Image: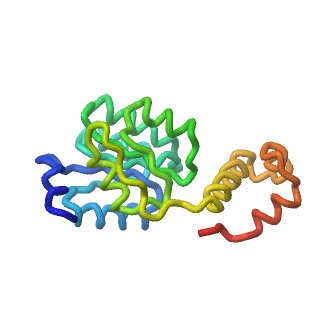
Amino acid sequence: MPEEDFANLGDDRSLLLVDDDEPFVKRLARAMEKRGFLPETAESVAEGKAIATTRPPAYAVVDLRLEDGNGLDVVETLREKRPGCRIVVLTGYGAIATAVAAVKIGAIDYLSKPADANDITNALLARGEALPLPPENPMSADRVRWEHIQRIYELCDRNVSETARRLNMHRRTLQRILAKRSPK
């Protein structure tokens, strides 16, 4: 990491990472520590809100979908306890509506998984009107489509017929897509 990025961190380098994917959050914590942050992890909305209330950090990376609820609840708590906190929302299910909701309640950026530590650092340290650089490894169009189909499938309680109807797609076509592995 360039030396000027350490200077951009300032004195308070505390970072809250909230994600229920334990291997991912541990890897991200190690990577962010190498970039000069002082990470603390949480794997649920309840843990994230508790840390945000007792030790509000200067920076936060919050997954949108957690097992016990919505990561936006953690974002709201962070905004209440530390209005200047720079928050990036992560999710594997990118959607315009949730991106707008995240930004409206105070997130500075919204990244789709898989986002790497460089993408996250760029988003956290972006200042003013400057937009962060585009991700080095963005999801392919096929992957975005696959993620969207998976999200609708889960929202329809894994009902193929209902999912096909909502996606305006033939049921057999959907079954073939669901039977394949996710694209890169």
Residue 161, percent from left and from top: 86, 50
Residue 2, percent from left and from top: 19, 63
Rendering quarter of residue 121: bottom left
User: Could you tell me which residue is drawn at 54 percent across and 60 percent down?
Assistant: 139
Q: Is residue 166 left or right of residue 10?
A: right
Quick one: 132 or 171, which is closer to the camera? 132
User: Could you tell me which residue is drawn at 58 percent across and 62 percent down?
Assistant: 140
Rendered position, 161 above or below 72: below
User: Could you tell me which residue is drawn at 36 percent across and 39 percent down?
Assistant: 108
Rendering quarter of residue 35: bottom left
Q: Report the quarter where the N terminus lies.
A: bottom left
User: Could you tell me which residue is drawn at 73 percent across and 51 percent down?
Assistant: 153
Rendered position, 53 above or below 168: above
Residue 40, percent from left and from top: 28, 54
Q: Is residue 127 left or right of residue 161?
A: left
Residue 173, percent from left and from top: 84, 60
Q: Is residue 15 left or right of residue 8?
A: right
Q: Is residue 46 left or right of residue 4?
A: right
